[in-house]
Amino acid sequence: MEVYRDTDIDEIGDNHIGTSYDTPMKEDAFELSDEEKIKKISSHFREIMDTLGLDLKDDSLRGTPDRVAKMYVKEIFSGLNPENRPDIKLFDNKYKYDEMLIEKNIHFFSNCEHHFVPIIGFAHVAYISNGKVIGLSKINRIVQHYAKRPQVQERLTVQIAEDLKKTLGTEDVAVLIDAKHLCVSMRGIEDTYSATVTSHFSGKFKDEATRREFLSLVPKPTE
Ligand SMILES: Nc1nc2c(ncn2[C@@H]2O[C@H](COP(=O)(O)OP(=O)(O)OP(=O)(O)O)[C@@H](O)[C@H]2O)c(=O)[nH]1
Ligand SMILES: [Zn+2]
């Protein structure tokens, strides 16, 4: 009898498992300007509304396609454009601070890439300085940058961790995300209470004691 193993999953159907944590983007993703993208999305969204049977002559609905298009490009999906990655200035760790620094309770809104409805949650991020110190708000800005993309929580977690590692020149980074997916609560299974917890620990945070210290200092995932 054939025994099914979890590792067989990538050979089943076209369920290809990639190795990259990059958001899958087309080669020509940046050929259109923001203004051109807004125009195109607006026209497609008008079609969606029209197909749903909405009267686009109504004065409240008339501007919606433009509003949605602008919101996608300039606001909730602005993190797809690498030019919008925040400028990060590092400082020397003159104070020789050698314990972990935690930026906790970073509240974010993202959107699920499967259903395009919100993911709402908290990120808790920590690092141990390797000589450089990052401005606190820049940690929040990095989280917001990757949150402003269609996402899955696993990728969001890894993208934040990998960016910080590169920026700070250290492997000693931890990221914990506790979030609610509206695609699970407002539709489908309609579970209002479940939440999703993901984490990434690398460098010194792989040590049991360091990981435990981090976990003891951030809020427990909602019970
Ligand atoms: N791993 C992972 N899955 C997610 C995330 N956000 C949403 N999903 C899931 O993605 C899956 C998409 O599965 P499909 O079966 O194609 O979609 P669906 O028919 O709408 O699924 P239901 O939500 O179960 O109705 C769902 O199970 C979602 O709950 C995420 O961040 N990570
Ligand atoms: Zn979803």
Image (spheres, grey):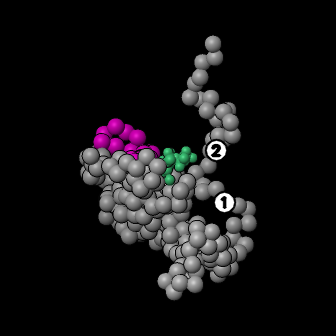
Viewer can see residue 86: yes
Residue lying at the far bottom of the rendered structure: 59
Which amino acid type is marked by label 2? Answer: Gly
Mark 1 to mark 2: distance in Å?
13 Å
The residue pinned by badge 2 equals: 18
Dot 2 falls on a residue whose secondary structure is loop
Q: Position of residue 62 (x, y in %)?
A: 55, 83
Quadrant placement of the N terminus = top right
Number of other residues with Cα within 10 Å of mark 1, as a class: few under 14, some 14 to 19, many 20 or more: few
Q: Nearer the viewer, residue 46 or 67?
A: 46
Q: Position of residue 11 (x, y in %)?
A: 67, 32
Q: Earlier in the sequence, mark 1 or mark 2?
A: 2
Question: Looking at the rendered structure, which numbered label has been put on residue 13?
Answer: none
26 left or right, relative to 173: right
Which amino acid type is marked by label 1? Answer: Met
Q: Quadrant of residue 131?
A: bottom left
136 left or right, relative to 37: left
Q: Quadrant of residue 9?
A: top right
Dot 1 falls on a residue whose secondary structure is loop
Q: Position of residue 51 (x, y in %)?
A: 63, 68
Q: Which residue appears at 64% of the width and 44% of the height?
A: 18
The residue pinned by badge 1 equals: 25
Q: Which residue appears at 43% of the width and 46% of the height?
A: 189
Task: Look at the image and say whether residue 218 sits in the magenta stretch.
Answer: no
Q: Is residue 198 above or below residue 120?
A: above
Q: Which residues are magenta?
A: 196-212
